[in-house]
Image: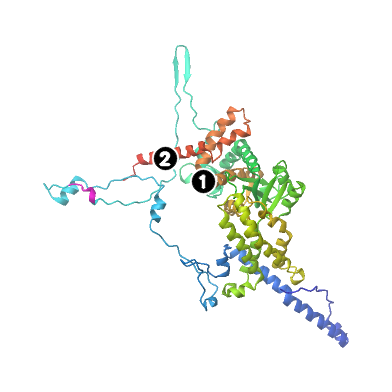
Amino acid sequence: MRTKKTMDYRFPHYTEDDLRALDPEALVWAYCLLQDRFEHLRDYDLPDLEEKYRISLVKRFGRSTEKSSSLTGHSQEKKPDGKATEQKSGESEQTDKVQKNHPVRHAGCADKVKKNLTVVDEQIELTPEELVKTFGEGVSYKDDPNFEKTYDVVCSLPVTHYIRRYHIHVYRGGGKIVTAVRHIGKMKAGSLMTPDILAEIVNDRCVLQLPMNRISQDFGRNGFPLTRQTMARWCIDIGFQYIGPLVCRMLDLLKAQRYLHADETFLTVARTPSGERKECRQWVFRTSSLLDAPQIIVFWFDETRSTDVLRELFGDAKSLVIICDAYVSYKTFAKEKEGDTIIANCYTHARRNFTDIIKAIPGFKTLSEEEQNEILSCRIVRMIDRIFKLERELKDLDAESRLAARQEKAMPIVNELFDFLHSLPDSDFDKSSKLYEAVNYMKNQEDGFRVFLQDGKVPVHNSSCEQAIIPFSLGRNNWKCIDSIDGAITLGYYYSLTETAKANGAVPLYYLKYLFERLPALFEASGGKPAPQSFDSLMPWTEDYRSYERQTIAELNKNLMQWKPAS
């Protein structure tokens, strides 16, 4: 650590003639001033710029892992007796190369992969002519099952779109005309949109992260040329008509759980109401990872990161605990709620500030563990890792037992961590350095970092919410921007469905099809305004959906068993 002094960069501009006219004392003063300025640039400004440059390179091109063994280069593998393997002398002098551990294939791997696949038996036999040619005319032979061999070959069927043409019969007799009435799967009169097609589009968009133009091209290659404009209009119309009310009900159920994760990510909208291209926000809220309750994930679009979003969504909620980062909107909202909302800060966010610094230190992995421990960022990361290790050991306990263990084992670690942070005076830091920002981030949010010590249902990190954002971020990298505000809003609705389905072990494609088949009938039966509670039976963790998924898979397997491959 170094103390940064204030430097006055104002320096008079002298021409050659001015310098020649100066007396010796003025020349000495000018030289000393220039020398001080150069030393300040060398000792403070250039190292700061170099650090920031290295961190930017690491974030852009470096490995994303934050595991301690990857950061430090020291393996924590254990021998069968439970003792960590010691590093041999000289290993610390290895070059800073990543040692890749190739996966080991264990016995039974292939069987584990194949266990959920349908088996279609195909008999490979010799024809009578081939048998006669092999054994000779008049020689008796038999098919011996004891020597029969079986080989498994995994196959796939290409996507096929076809037309199911319904012929609705009309009957006349006794002065009556009777029409055979049956629901034929259309979601909109005069439209080609069906639950199957719309589910496929949304699945491609939100699960496979494909942009609309690629989905359109793929449909065209399979003989069903849909334009991306048509597909986008379908998604927007159905999103506002049916999916929006369902997502609002999911949000109500999430608020009733009281413990939730919160985060936000950016997306670019090409045409906002002002007509400008603008970077907007997709807020993400998720059930606490420690709750024994169905996982609910809600994506909510807004043009800003304003506290107004939290006021709109959670202003009427009671006794909330929000696990999040230290963004000011969360703290402002909690302050307005006057103790009715508690903010619990995320240790992963805090740790990441220090791991970024570690990654940017040249040759860090070549240092011995003792040398690494002398680096402030590494010491803090290892203290936080002790908290994470303890949490992994406590994850299967109930809330009361977890809280008791935290107060006994985690509280001393947290006290040690913050005592160490507070022992570091600000005067020892360069105020523009990343290390100063990282240390003060934790010191300023100490109350939020201690919340998990008072409540066993509060996680120590917000990683589960970040994991739900990853698919959205991958998709954003593919489609770059959203054309309109309506598209951004409904995209959040659909991501809410697919991520909630995945979090509860449902197949997103089947769940989307299930909803698109049932929602129109639900809205029609209620006159277009179903009660919020009526959506509860459509959630992906319900037995009604589970039975639907099992039945759908069974029908597909039955059809596959009847299918014969072309010779």
The secondary structure making up most of the magenta span is loop
Q: Is residue 437 left or right of residue 217?
A: right
Residue 543 is situated, as x and y percent measured from the top left of the image, at 51, 37
Q: Residue 386: x and y, percent?
A: 60, 63
Residue at position x 73%, y 77% from top? Answer: 43
The residue positioned 47% from the left and 12% from the top of the image is 175
- Residue 392 percent coordinates (x, y): 56, 57
- Report the quarter where the N terminus lies: bottom right
Q: Is residue 55 magenta?
A: no
> Residue 92, located in which quarter of the rendered image?
bottom right
Instruction: Determine the residue positioned at 77% across, 47% down.
Output: 336
| Residue 363 or residue 197, whichever sits in front | 363
**Where 456 sits versus 29, above or below?**
above
Q: Which mark identifies residue 240? A: none
Q: Which residue is mark 2?
A: 556
Magenta range is 142-146
Disc 1 designates what residue? 505
